[in-house]
Image: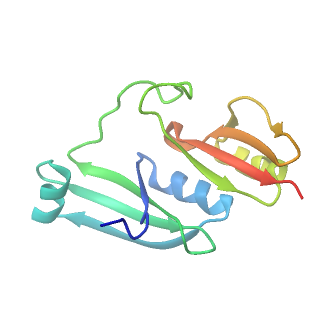
Amino acid sequence: MAIQRMDNVGIVIDDMEAAIAFFLELGMELEGRTQVEGLVADQCTGLDGVRCDIAMVRTPDGHSRLELAKYRTPEAISDGPRNRPHNVLGTHRVMFTVDDIEDTVARLRPHGAELLGEIARFEDSFLLCYVRGPEGIIVGLAEELR
C-alpha cells in the first residue's frame, strides 16, 4: 500500500497571530482555525490534557498545507535556541517556490524574516535562499529562472 498524498506539515508555534501574518504575507491562504482537545487529541499525540489552537494555511494551488499549532496545555517545550543553524539534526525547513525572491524577502522582513545567508544562484535554474521566520522556522525560497 502506498501513501495517497502528504496532507500537511505541522509546526508548533507560540505567537499564532505573528505566524499566520508571516505565512499570509508569503502568499498562503488561511483555510481555517479551530481548537482541538479531548481523548482523540491525547491519544494521537501521546500527551495528556491536550488543548491546542490550530490554524491551517494552504498554498494558492491548494496542494500543500501547514498546520500551525499553539499548545495551551500541556505548555509547549523549547528544545533550545530558536536561531539554530540549518545543519542541526532534526531541524527542518519548509520550501516554497515564489515568483520574485527579492520581493518576497523584502515583504517578509517586516514580519521578522532574516536571511540565513544570501540569495544564491544555482546554475541557470534557480535563485535560492533560506530565511528564518517566526519561532525560528527556516523557510526556503526558490525562484525558478526562465
> Does residue 53 appear in the picture of this structure?
yes
Across and down, in percent, residue 76 comes to 30, 41
Q: Is residue 124 left or right of residue 110?
A: right
Q: Which residue is drawn at the image coordinates 62% and 63% (left, top)?
A: 24
Q: Is residue 35 above or below residue 21?
A: below
Across and down, in percent, residue 80 comes to 40, 24
Quadrant into which the N terminus falls: bottom left
Q: Which residue is drawn at the image coordinates 41% and 33% (left, top)?
A: 90
Q: Quadrant of residue 109?
A: top right
Q: Is residue 37 above or below residue 114?
A: below
Q: Which residue is drawn at the image coordinates 35% and 52% (left, top)?
A: 70
Quadrant into which the C terminus falls: bottom right
> Does residue 38 appear in the picture of this structure?
no
Colour setting: rainbow
Q: Which residue is drawn at the image coordinates 11% and 49% (left, top)?
A: 48
Between 89 and 5, the residue placed more toward the observer is 5
Give the mark count: 0
Across and down, in percent, residue 96 comes to 65, 55
Between 109 and 79, the residue placed more toward the observer is 79
Q: Is residue 41 above or below residue 33?
A: above
Q: Quadrant of residue 67?
A: bottom left
